[in-house]
Image (tube, rainbow, N blue to C red):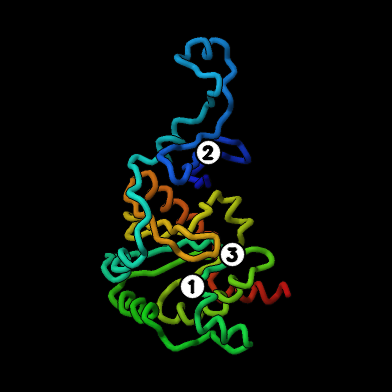
Amino acid sequence: MALRFLGTTSDGGDCPTLYEIEGTDEILVQGVRETGPEHLAQLRDVKPSETFVRVPRDLLTRFAPRHVHTGVIPFAEVAHVFSDFNHTAWRLETRLGYATDRRSDAWARWQAGKDVTHDEPDDWRRNVAEQTAQGKTFGRVRLVDDPPTEGQRFLLSRAPSNVAVGDDIRYLWRTAALRLGLPDFDFWLIDSRTLLRFVFDEDDATLGVVRSEDPAEVVAACQARDAAWHHALSAADFAEQVRSMV
């Protein structure tokens, strides 16, 4: 079963970290192994398969989920939040590519060498324009590998169409994201209150989202947003940086 990174208080490579074991209600704790004889002697009902680790109290306070997830729900069931939200919709994009992009007409045109930089507004961009006209904000940070994957280059070429209607898209190298301890999964953070974590299959197709208002998970997402936003470059500046590397 896959592990999902929840958070860490590590600094400079120290180990205390929490993971969720996906598909279960269990949390995996990474920490320093307890070897003190006086402590081990006081433990109760120890099984031969069990071990014990030390972690900072702050790790559990900040990142341990307090509620059990209800499971994956279709994205269509939560799509209304992008018009119903009150002030902020923010996304972290972490994948090498997305099936929805590869299936799009724009992808085929881009593959054929055509310019897809300033396409006509679609339903998503029209909604962004409507919501931002009311003073709401859309933003996202996209992680990019070095060299960028085909899917990442496609999205970079398409970014100006979204930026033009108010979707503030910024970019961050994956190496920087790893240094910052950012999550390795995609999510939307709505009004700093609701977390929508994407679930994908092995072909990068969206299976649905897991919705959470767990305070620990929401705070962790807010911290990830603030760190990513601070270090990321605008789409235009990042595109220029990538061009200068070629």
Total tally of numbered discs in the picture: 3
Task: Identify the mark nearer the N-term, 2 or 3.
Answer: 2
Residue where numbered disc 1 is placed: 100
- Point 26% across, 68% down: residue: 84
Q: What residue type is labelled 3?
A: Leu
- Point 54% across, 75% down: residue: 102
x, y (%) of residue 111? 62, 83
Q: Are marks 2 and 1 in contact (CB under 8 Å)?
A: no
Query: How many other residues sit within 10 Å of disc 2, few (<14), some (14-19) or many (≥20)?
Result: many
**Dot in front, 1 or 3:** 1
How much space separates mark 1 and mark 3, taking CA atoms? 13 Å
How much space separates mark 2 and mark 3, taking CA atoms? 24 Å
Residue where numbered disc 2 is placed: 17
**Dot in front, 2 or 3:** 3
Residue where numbered disc 3 is placed: 96
Image quadrant where one finds the C terminus:
bottom right
Q: Is mark 2 on a helix, strand or loop?
A: strand
Q: Do the residues labelled 1 and 3 touch (CB within 8 Å)?
A: no
Q: What element carries label 3?
A: loop
**146 over 5 or under it: above or below:** below
x, y (%) of residue 229? 49, 61
- The picture quadrant where one finds residue 235 is bottom right
Q: Is mark 1 on a helix, strand or loop?
A: helix
Q: Which amino acid does label 1 sit on?
A: Thr
Residue 90 relative to residue 1: left or right = left
x, y (%) of residue 37? 57, 11
Query: How many other residues sit within 10 Å of disc 3, few (<14), some (14-19) or many (≥20)?
Result: some
